[in-house]
Amino acid sequence: MYQATFRQMTKQLGQLDKWLETAEASAKARAFEPSLFLGFRLSPDQFAFARQVQITCDTAKLGASRLTGKEAPSHPDTETTLAELRARVQSVVAYLDSFTAKDFEKVATATITQPRWEGKTMTGPDYFLEHVVPNFFFHLTTTYAILRHNGVAIGKRDYLGALTQTAPAA
Amino acid sequence: MYQATFRQMTKQLGQLDKWLETAEASAKARAFEPSLFLGFRLSPDQFAFARQVQITCDTAKLGASRLTGKEAPSHPDTETTLAELRARVQSVVAYLDSFTAKDFEKVATATITQPRWEGKTMTGPDYFLEHVVPNFFFHLTTTYAILRHNGVAIGKRDYLGALTQTAPAA
């Protein structure tokens, strides 16, 4: 289930990559500089668009890395264009694609910490359920919301992507 | 894991209930009618706040019901106040609290469909991972985003709620 959920997050990052492509085209069609998107935000005291994309990426990347001990690629938060944000998303997709079910075998007994927790720890399953999944979808959806708020023509299907469905018997 | 994830969704619905309480107080402090929130939206062609709360509730409620076959309470989408939305959230929390691990035993072999799919089906695990979880967090976060956009003083900790952490040894 851990691997399956990270696969779903990988799929969602693929959708995010497409939204960024659509945002670029939308800016060009409306004759404004596409990189303006990076500074847009829904509230003055909420992170701007670029940071939302970066945290979406990092939540998936660092979540997988901390739960498995597999070293993650470094991303120094220096993106200034939509193309650079897309490259980051694609880099995380490639990293997550490298995982196998075996990599997640020790999640149940893992102990997780991070600098801001000041020594506190979480179990692997608690970290995954209470932190990684809610944060990933939070920043992904906030990214989507900033685009929708600024008139980019994406919809719910662009959020979910294709569903694995079986057609009715003829 | 299915049960654990629905427990997490139940926790998030408890957080949502608190946001609605904060929104009510925020409106009163700023001297506007609290029920105005129900019509706010981030984009003219996106669902308004009340609908976002309703779909958040329904995604969790109908997801659990379809995956387990356990009958769900009916909610006719007639809410006109924040208090009525809170009652709906609390009703879904109570419903989800009634589930046990045993209720989810047959998810792996379940076949799911819904009217709008026109006869197409999904497996229980695919429906859960590709549909229920992404949709739940989408509408939950959009609800949060509309409140933040309209100046309600909630933050990331109000989104996540308390984390299950262990303090370092003394």
Image (cartoon, coloured by chain):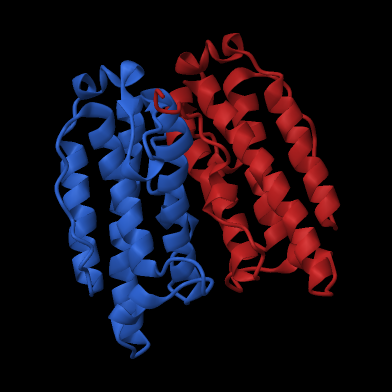
Chain colours: A red, B blue
Q: Extreme bottom residue here?
A: B31
Image vertical order of residue B38 relative to residue B123, above or below: below
In this orientation, which residue lies closer to the viewer: A162 or B152? A162
The structure residue drawn at horizontal position 63% and vertical position 13%, both measured from the top left corner, is A100
What is the tally of numbered marks visible in this picture? 0
Q: Quadrant of the C terminus of chain B?
A: top left
Tell me if residue A99 can be seen: yes
Tell me if residue B170 can be seen: no
| Rendered image quadrant of residue A117 | top right
The structure residue drawn at horizontal position 33% and vertical position 30%, both measured from the top left corner, is B112
In this orientation, which residue lies closer to the viewer: B93 or B114? B114
User: Would residue B168 appear left or right of B68 to someone viewing this image?
Assistant: right
User: Would residue A61 appear left or right of B165 to someone viewing this image?
Assistant: right
The structure residue drawn at horizontal position 62% and vertical position 56%, both measured from the top left corner, is A143
| Rendered image quadrant of residue B154 | bottom left
Image vertical order of residue B57 relative to residue B82, above or below: above
Query: x%, y% of residue A135?
Result: 52, 45
| Rendered image quadrant of residue A90 | top right
User: Would residue A21 appear left or right of A151 to someone viewing this image?
Assistant: right
Image vertical order of residue B160 relative to residue A124, above or below: below
Q: Quadrant of the N terminus of chain B?
A: top left
Query: x%, y% of residue B129?
Result: 45, 31
Query: x%, y% of residue A53?
Result: 68, 51
Image vertical order of residue A111 relative to residue A144, above or below: above
The structure residue drawn at horizontal position 62% and vertical position 58%, both measured from the top left corner, is A154
Query: x%, y% of residue A29?
Result: 81, 69
In this orientation, which residue lies closer to the viewer: B6 or B153? B6
